[in-house]
Amino acid sequence: MNTKHPSDSKTTVTDLVLPSETNAIHTLFGGELLARMDRAASITAQRHSERIVVTASVNHVAFNHAIPLGSIVTIEAKVSRAFKSSMEVYLDVWYTDNNFNTPIKANEAIFTFVAVDENGKPVQIPELIPESEQEKKRFDGALRRRQLSLVLAGKMDAEDASELKALFKKK
Ligand SMILES: CC(C)(COP(=O)(O)OP(=O)(O)OC[C@H]1O[C@@H](n2cnc3c(N)ncnc32)[C@H](O)[C@@H]1OP(=O)(O)O)[C@@H](O)C(=O)NCCC(=O)NCCS
């Protein structure tokens, strides 16, 4: 199977924050941002695998900065590592407020997608070769995050999570 780089499937989505998408303090509703990130990440995963994909897990999300009404929100999604049928997608989110200041980094998130056939059965995907320093760093951490996700989902015994356990060992 062929190999791909993160830039081959990178997806950038830009959209506004409208009144119907905000909470009581007029900032972007968290669930709305989650849906936007899921869409952007799923396009990236489809581009990488050239298959139908489903969201297997939301591994991490933190809302570090509230995004005000009227802001321009940019979501960048890149595959950070591909395994057999699953792939980790890393998202970076920025916004520009109504004063058109320099874009502010709002948050990062990590999702896992699985490529499936028409019957929902997992299928093999291309390998990912990271290029930039940041891509290599995210690639290296992805195995640990995959093990954590599988342990939390009850799909892996913590005893077998070697990469994860290594984090807690004294140097
Ligand atoms: C995700 C799904 C396809 C996995 O199917 P499964 O029968 O459990 O398949 P497997 O156990 O063989 O796992 C397939 C891959 O998913 C990965 N996976 C499954 N659950 C995971 C989790 N919670 N976190 C990270 N990876 C996970 C496995 O590690 C495996 O990866 P690999 O092939 O790269 O080694 C299945 O659970 C599913 O269809 N879930 C519903 C998805 C959905 O509806 N999402 C929301 C709407 S899009």
Image (cartoon, grey):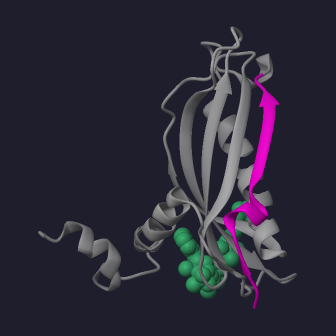
Left or right of 120? Residue 160 is left
Residue 36 point in image, percent of width and height: 74, 42
* Residue 5 counted in the magenta span: yes
Give the x, y percent position of residue 114: 68, 74
- Residue that appears at 48% across and 68% down: 142
Residue 42 placed where, x, y %? Answer: 75, 59
Q: Which residues are magenta?
A: 1-17
Taking the image as shown, residue 85 lies to the left or right of residue 105, namely right
Tell me the quarter of the picture where residue 165 sits: bottom left
User: Is the C terminus in the top left, top right, bottom left or bottom right quadrant?
Assistant: bottom left
User: Residue furthest toward the top?
Assistant: 99
Q: Nearer the viewer, residue 104 or 32?
A: 104
Number of numbered labels in the structure image: 0
Residue extending furthest toward the right: 118
Q: Is residue 155 above or below residue 106?
A: below
Q: Nearer the viewer, residue 30 or 107?
A: 107
